[in-house]
Image (cartoon, rainbow, N blue to C red):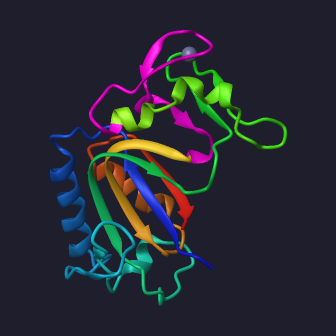
Amino acid sequence: MGDHFQTIVDLDATERDAERLGAGILDWLIADGIVAAERTDCVLDGDGHGNPPGPYYARAVHDPEPVDLWSNGLYITTGRTVFDSGQGEPQAATCPLCATGIRLVDDTWSPVDDAWEPFAGRFADWEKGGEGTVECPSCHRPSGIDRWSWEDDCFACGQLGLTFWNWAELTHDFEQEVRRRLGGHRTVTLRGKL
Ligand SMILES: [Zn+2]
């Protein structure tokens, strides 16, 4: 089985506004009964405490079924984070400047060390507050690894993430509303499993 999660990552939130934006989203979700106000031991992030589903949780998802797994809450992450869907090696990364997809696996789906070379250590550098500069193998221009996109949304770098544990698939409308309340920020949704 394993535990599934969906994380909506805000790609535009800054270090300064991530906390405020996250608090605003939480207030709205509590007011609408999507999550309960009282934090309980219901997530697999951080200290394990999150907001469990509220009475109207079903409004946010397709095919709602009661979430009876132990980990069924919302966890909000703030601060520089490399979000990882836990789905293994990405097949390709796309340069934000020239839009070239850099293939990262060979025909047997094994990671290619040479292809990974420009990215080596960059996630860790960015997470520690650095630029995480990647020189694109195609256009040879530098850009921060937080601006690259990853096939199947394997990774996303951001200052704010909303992780829903074991919920049915979030609806498009719900994700739209989240984006609207984040001030129209770009988001990406990671779907993964532990
Ligand atoms: Zn490029």
Quarter of the rendering occupied by the C terminus:
bottom right
**From the viewer's perspective, is 52 left or right of 84?**
left
Q: Residue at x 32, y 81 (%)?
A: 52
Quarter of the rendering occupied by the N terminus:
bottom right
**From the viewer's perspective, is 31 left or right of 34?**
left
The magenta stretch spans which residues? 127-153
Residue 56 is situated, as x and y percent measured from the top left of the image, at 35, 82
Q: Is residue 119 above or below residue 17?
A: above
Q: Give yes or no for residue 144 being in the magenta stretch.
A: yes
Residue 8 is situated, as x and y percent measured from the top left of the image, at 41, 55
Residue 110 vs residue 183, the one in the foreground:
110
Q: Is residue 47 above or below residue 153?
A: below
Residue 88 is situated, as x and y percent measured from the top left of the image, at 63, 52
Residue 147 vs residue 122, the one in the foreground:
122
**From the viewer's perspective, is 43 left or right of 47?**
right
* Viewer can see residue 102: no
Residue 65 is situated, as x and y percent measured from the top left of the image, at 53, 86
Q: Give yes or no for residue 67 being in the magenta stretch.
A: no
